[in-house]
Image (spheres, rainbow, N blue to C red):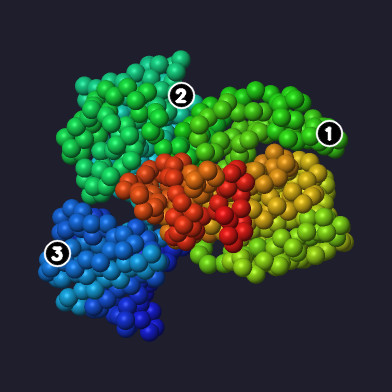
Amino acid sequence: MLSFEPLPDSGLAVVDPIERRRYTLGTPKSVAPEPASADRFYFPVDRAVRISTDELTLDQRVDAFVRGATGELLFEVGSDTAEKLPPGEYCVELNAPVKVYLRVDGALSVRASVNRIGFRFDPAEILVGARSYHHHPQATVTTTDDPEDVLTALSALSSALKTTTCERSYPTLRGHPPTVELGDELRVPAELERPETGVRLELPPTLDAAYVAAPLAYYLGAEMVPGDEARLVAGDFEHSLPSARFERGVERALKRVFFLDCLTRTEGYYRVDLYERERADLDVDFSALYDLPIAEQLPAYFSVPFDRLAPHVPRWPLTAHVAPTPEHVGAIPFVVNDLGVVRTPSATPVSADDVRSTVVESFLDDVRGESEGDYAFVRPEPGASLEQAWFADDLPLRATKAIPQAFRNKLECEPKSGFIDIAVVCNEPKMATDEGVKDVYGCRDELSFDVTIHADLSTAELRTVLESDVDFLHYVGHIDDAGFRCRDGSLDATTVTDVGVPTFLLNACQSYEQGLALVEGGSVGGVVTFSDVVSDGAARMGYAMARLLNLGFPLGSALGLARTESIVGGHYLVVGDGSADAVQVEDGVPTLCDVRTRDEGYDVTPVTHPSREGKIGTMAFPLVESNEHHYLVPGALRTFRLSEAELRQYLVWHQSPVRKDGELVWDEDPL
């Protein structure tokens, strides 16, 4: 349950204990919150209080919107907003780590700068409401391995939707689906009520059909029922999903409805200039569609050729290749939570030439050495998503080896703001010298890292590090069949049952098995390698990943960007959950500033990545003087031609890593 905690001297903290999130509103003096009715807010809130204060301040910029009494948008708070509103009824919406609303009955003044927002009230009394982003599941559904039971169980995932309007395209209105586990009978908790949308998906009663259709059913609030042929039905509307193109048809249906919802919602509470709506230039009456229920929107949505939509759909965050076996049913809610596309595994075996093409020159020699016959390597069928996750046997190239336990571990982790704690373990003196670990981490005072370097640890000392709550482990040393090599023997990670380190990089030969063990023992995700990567390049990989994680990039995105730092980048693989993050993103979404030098000025393309708070459907607004649009996240936004002065100002306003002419630049002055 959300709570409001007055701070000792001044201010009010909004606390979400389930999501482990905390956000502070500044006040000039101490306040005494009193319970208030949540019904006073036009938008849904979980809890509300009344406080007496004539001023609230936010010391860090968040997206803020000022609305009228019935939710109509009056203005969005910009970096230079200075507004005075006459007495009336107002609602202020704050997209903070906890969703916050202010209800104002009186005069309201708003003044903002690049890094601060201040509100003044007359009379000096407001209501504060808050809503959890609901990243954690509410309950657990149990199902047998019978496909018809699985269809019923996965139909319950849409109980997490907070609305059935097109606003569910905003991630804050899509809650985390309930978890699902195998059992002796089908049990759907009574508190999980699937919304009545009048939409159903008729599907062959098979596990692969149930898994593939689950994200679409979740988003539409549709009931999945057995049928002879796959089709989407809403009243008199029917859309066939032929078996020959079933997976592709479901994927297109999900992207179509989601994207058109994003365009339609601009007729509602957020009347912004959306770049994708302008570029798509569709002959669609969005104002007429806005107030229609889902079942009545679908005929109009499916009348638009998908080829007209495809170039403008945001970069999809995830394609999950899930083996249609009963034990994988528990992975589906976590894939659905990211609105991922589900496919049944399709891949080609990897030949020696294929492996070498990923710059892993010694890969096969290593595998044939001590681990011959243990692994089979595959290249998943390519997809356009940011991340490819492989929930199946064998090891994928250029994809995350997804481990269901990682997602359960993620529910127990607490991304945080402030310093990122890094443990660098150097258990081989020569390797420490080769990697220049102290130069990379220990002598960079300007970084917001709290770095502890451990050298030549014993098995007991390394066990203590693995059980600690540091945010990121960079291990340098030897790993063999016995485990992590220490000064007094080897530590096998399978014996560490309470791993506290959520994310890690193991710069050691053939560290895959030990990385798997860390995930099974409590980690959320990490990066492993199958070949000898002890070099300056490996140190650069670790340093770049730490920087990117510290800026809120998820693990898979961080590895994808860090790979460009070194020729050994192709040696690395994510195990666990590629969307794992180490740091709470306070302002917007993690964004790469991609810079190309031109004869006059620079071409600058912001490239957004999803985060825990900024999933697909979030909007970004680059602070560029010439920009007048919002953009859908994730993916590359438009390219701006900026002068050097304009680019420097952009980098002041946005805490973004810079990729200049194809290379990541970490200098204080990247230009």
User: Quadrant where the N terminus lies?
Assistant: bottom left
Q: Is residue 472 left or right of residue 464?
A: left
In 3D space, how far apart are the residues under numbered discs 2 and 3 (Cα atoms)? 49 Å
Q: Is 117 placed above or below 643 here?
A: below
Is residue 89 visible from the viewing direction of this image?
yes
**Residue at the image point whose x is 44% and y is 18% from the top:** 245
Nearest to N terminus: mark 2 or mark 3: 3
Is residue 486 visible from the viewing direction of this image?
no
Amino acid type at image mark 2: Glu
Q: Secondary structure at mark 2?
A: helix
**Residue 603: image location, x then y, percent:** 48, 44
Q: Nearer the viewer, residue 378 or 265?
A: 265
Q: Nearer the viewer, mark 2 or mark 3?
A: 3
In 3D space, how far apart are the residues under numbered discs 1 and 3 (Cα atoms)? 71 Å
Q: Is residue 558 left or right of residue 233?
A: right
Nearest to N terminus: mark 1 or mark 3: 3
Q: Is residue 291 left or right of residue 345?
A: left
User: Quadrant where the C terminus lies?
Assistant: bottom right
Q: Secondary structure at mark 3?
A: strand
**Residue at the image point whose x is 21% and y is 21% from the top:** 236
Amino acid type at image mark 3: Glu
In 3D space, how far apart are the residues under numbered discs 2 and 1 (Cα atoms)? 37 Å
**Residue 405: image location, x then y, percent:** 58, 46
The disc label shown at residue 247, or none: 2
Q: Nearer the viewer, residue 547 or 245?
A: 547
**What residue is shown with label 3?**
89
Q: Secondary structure at mark 1?
A: helix
